[in-house]
Amino acid sequence: NQVIVQRVMSAKTVNEGRLGFLFVAFLYVFTLFIFIAPGMVGRMIDLFGVGDTLPNEIIGGNTLRAQYGIDTNEVYPRLILKLLPVGLIGVMIACMVSALTSTLSATLSSVSTLFTMDFYKSWRPESSPRHLVRVGQWTSFIALVVAVLWAPLIGKFASLVAYYQEFSSYLAPPIVGTFLVGLFWKGSTRNGAFAGLMSGLAMSALIMTYKFGFGGVVPFHFLLWVPILLILSVLVNIIVSKCDRNKETDVETYTWNKSVWQDDTRELKTVPWYKNFRYISIALIIIALLEYWWFF
């Protein structure tokens, strides 16, 4: 989230920031084809040399690895090496390394900035800018070490996509719930937001520790935990906020209200429909629903 915020804040105007978000959202419409098409092509050309031994049914990544020796993480690299000419292989590798480096540097920058400015500076407000820079550098280094130690866990998953989807399903709902309540409800307090966020993350931590640390069996599929964790964090946020005596003041600036809609409506009167972010958002929602209906 911090990475996205940093990039949006570099936009010249608020509208350009909105359009940037929507452009990325339209790219996500093609995610289904980007992830599935390479696997289908790899199967058609017998990329791993298994012939006709694969049954005509959906097979999990762990089963493919254990019974057929197929690592789904290798499908895309093997397609590049097998189907593309030498020059384009170099271009593709350069693109992949560039994307990886960009994402890594942005993530490390976000981690160091969040810890240094939001936590360390509040603990040591007298710290000089040079000292804060040094703290940020050490934070980035420690984050890299933790990532290296964490990497073996990723190998237990069927694929990188499976790892990303499952961990996002556990970690994202409390963050989304806290954000939505704070955006649309004026009664939310800082204590309520913190309690809602921590309760959802604590529940997620228990699930992941039980499942991955002790090899336990979680009763629901990880996607079904998304609404459960979301509702849990929202309910805790509301309850704690209602009981909190330290009510927030001056929340009009930070919560959505009718004036925001009215101001946008006035600004959009002179904007062509194809540049109007509302029409673009509606088109995006319709396309997403049609895609879901078609492949359901």
Image (spheres, helix red, strand yellow):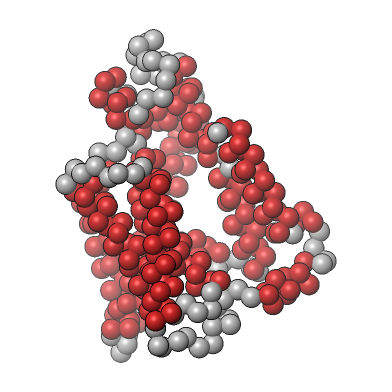
271 with respect to 234 (left or right): right
**Residue that appears at 61% across and 47% down:** 26
**Residue that appears at 42% across and 78% down:** 241
Which residue is farthest left? 214
Q: Quadrant of residue 64?
A: top left
* Residue 120: image location, x then y, percent: 30, 78
The N terminus, quarter of image: bottom left
Camera sees residue 109:
no
Task: State the residue in front, 108 or 38.
Answer: 38
**Residue that appears at 40% across and 88% down:** 245
Relative height, residue 261 to residue 58 (above, below): below
Q: Quadrant of residue 260?
A: bottom right
Relative height, residue 77 to residue 28 (above, below): above
* Residue 223: image location, x then y, percent: 41, 45
Which residue is farthest top? 52
Camera sees residue 123:
yes
204 with respect to 45 (left or right): left
